[in-house]
Image (cartoon, coloured by chain):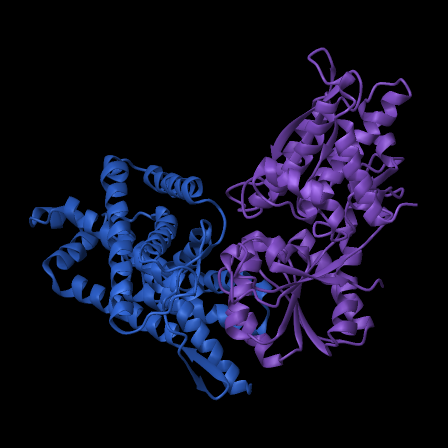
Chain colours: A blue, B purple
Amino acid sequence: MTAGDILLQQAINGLSLGAMYSLLALGFTLVYGIMELINFAHFNVFMVGSMIAMLVLQAFGLSGQQTILTGLPLIGVLLVGFIVSMVGCGLIGVLIERFLLRPLRNVKGPAAMITTIGVSYILFNLVLLTLGTDSKNFPNPLPPIKWEIGGAVLRLREVLIWVIALALMGGLTYFVTYTKLGKAMRATAQDPEAARMMGVEVDRVVMSAFFLGSALAGASGMIFGLYYNLAKVDIGFAAGLRAFTAAVLGGIGNVPGAMLGGVLIGLIESGSGQVIGAAWTDVVIFGILVLVLVFRPAGLLGRLAPNKS
Amino acid sequence: MLTRRNAFKAAAGLAATATVGTAGVANAADKVIKIGLNMSFTGADAESAVRVANAAIMAFDDANSTGAIKGYKFEYVKFDDGTATAGQYDPAQAATNARKMVSDKAFVAALGPQMSGAGKAMAPILSEGNLAIITPSSTNPDITDPKFAAQYRPAGKAIYFRTVATDAFQGPNMANFMAKTLKIKSVYVLDDSGAYGVGIADAFQAQIEKNGVKVLGRDRLDPKAVDYAAVLTKIKALNPDALYFGGVGQAGVKLVKQSYEIVPNMIKAGGDGVYSTDILKGAGFPSFDNWYSTQASPHVTEEKGSEVFTTRFFQRFGSRPDDYAVTCYTAAQVIIQAAKDIVATGKEPTRDAMQAAIQNVSLKGSLIGTVEFDPNGDMKNKVISVFQVKKDAAKPLDDTESQFKYVGVAPMS
């Protein structure tokens, strides 16, 4: 491999990681933008999403990497996998919001944030007790198609992840910018009081934000499984923390910021693994985060938070 | 001197004939010899923990039902050093368990832990309480190394005994095997940041360099990270003949999967940490095919003499024992033998007496041959066995005994 091949390969690695982090970061950002709440339950909603996706694929009779599908069956299985994990996670998000966070909506202080940490551990332990701690072999029906570009290898699953991530982000941007509910979300984010006076149902808006954010976590759970062929009870903390960092790096509350942050963190991770060593990855990521926050406290693209004045 | 095969027959015969002497079957009036079983029942190593603990339970139950020691019976209490948050053994939990055992005077000896990281946390506490522990599988050499006596046995006496060899042999002997038998010319070394992983990788690296093999690089994986593509891409570009991984299942599963994607044809090897059900299940085939691994014990479960043990184990627990179940069974036999030695002299099996008796034990005819300890607590007899993963579709794909093929004994340094 020449230096150029290595650079290209690490860029491919980084972009795939980045796509996953971006989708996850969007969930943090959507909820924060509207409620100024950091939803730590998001970590493990993502993990539950990957478990749901795994169970769906297993229900289709797929196990490990033994069964390869092509054409319509492949598209069908993937579609059902994505829809079930997204809707499942979306509903979990809605339940968390409706029954655990809404009663705390007007409580000042960190009560709501602490609640989300508690919920995160409840989800973690539910999966721990029902599915166990071992690493699961996530079924992967994707054909092992790959393209060689010089010495670098681009695999079908990487392209698929980018396409799906871009489509979901595009859909979200369209939704937030052009639909009525999306406009209501942005209005609530800017000024909840004024939005309420203009007839926006704030409860519905908050619930939609939770549904959308959690559904994206479900999608990233499925993507994670397809990319690593792995589902495990502790992946939420590992990937979740990086995604949260991505959201803060890009400017929490800011939708394009979350996408940018995710891609940057992914590229930094693969770059530092190549140049400095995998042992230093966290040091590099969090070091850059600290530097950015020192000079741009609101993140790269600026923070969008409710106007609470 | 018994040959090993005869030793099995003797051991098997012992188990069979012991049932004849039922005169001293344990009864309620017997005094209790309380033993702690500290394993990682939660997390990535839970399955092997149950298997290893079962082997000890079988040994103690045998001793009780046959009245091996007149007037006494064994009682065991399980301690779990794994936590859900750690996802594997947790040194803090291991230390807590050690304190619990030390503070209860009834505990006179212990078995465990499986993992060196837990052992490092437990050893100083057990030393203060002079509570002897025998580990069936933790192989980090530091714990018993006299150089680190101030750290791991501050009270002076050896309390950390092993029925396995250490990574001081496991890593280097594997290095000899890879240099001499596999004839590799260059290697990249990875570890998983744990006490065991770093130790075995260091020992491997030092010896492989002595063999004239070029080490193209050394890196450390975060076991909780999910993506090792960056470091594997770097390795692919360096193109070494082989990749050596010091570590256990948590990082291992991800490394096995991703290395198959990125460097499918490279020779890959690890220590006993990759001899793992968790990796067979989580990574499976074809990713795991052809990986080499070692065990820090003689390979006995396939030998004829151990059939009695294997069959009884299977009948009772419904799963096959692995080599570390054998070393744990042997460790329990050492404790039973030590207690027997003490009672034979008319004394009480107290903690101090047990420590001294284990130090001086000579258990002949066990499944792994004669067990005797040097003054540091290490076994005098050290054998490292090499295995290679070879898919056997006719057998359960997550059974280590069926999927790891015995290659031979790794050459001593």
Which one is in front, B230 or B319?
Answer: B319
Judge left or right: residue B5 versus residue A63: right
Instruction: Please identify the quarter of the rendering in which residue B130 is found.
Output: top right
Tell me where residue B392 appears, x and y as whole percent: 56, 62
Q: Residue furthest top?
A: B29
Q: Residue furthest left?
A: A199
Instruction: Please identify the quarter of the rendering in which residue B91 is found.
Output: top right
Judge left or right: residue A174 versus residue A19: left
Q: Is residue A304 visible?
A: yes
**Figure quadrant of the C terminus of chain B:** bottom right
Tell me where residue B35 appears, x and y as whole percent: 71, 28
Q: Is residue B193 visible?
A: no
Which one is in front, A54 or B92?
Answer: A54
**Figure quadrant of the N terminus of chain B:** top right
Tell me where residue A158 appears, x and y as whole percent: 38, 73
Residue located 36% across and 49% down the image: A48
Q: How many marks?
A: 0
Q: Is residue A127 above or below residue B349?
A: below
Judge left or right: residue A98 versus residue B44: left
Q: Is residue B106 above or below residue A308?
A: above
Tell me where residue B60 appears, x and y as whole percent: 71, 29
Judge left or right: residue B200 versus residue A300: right
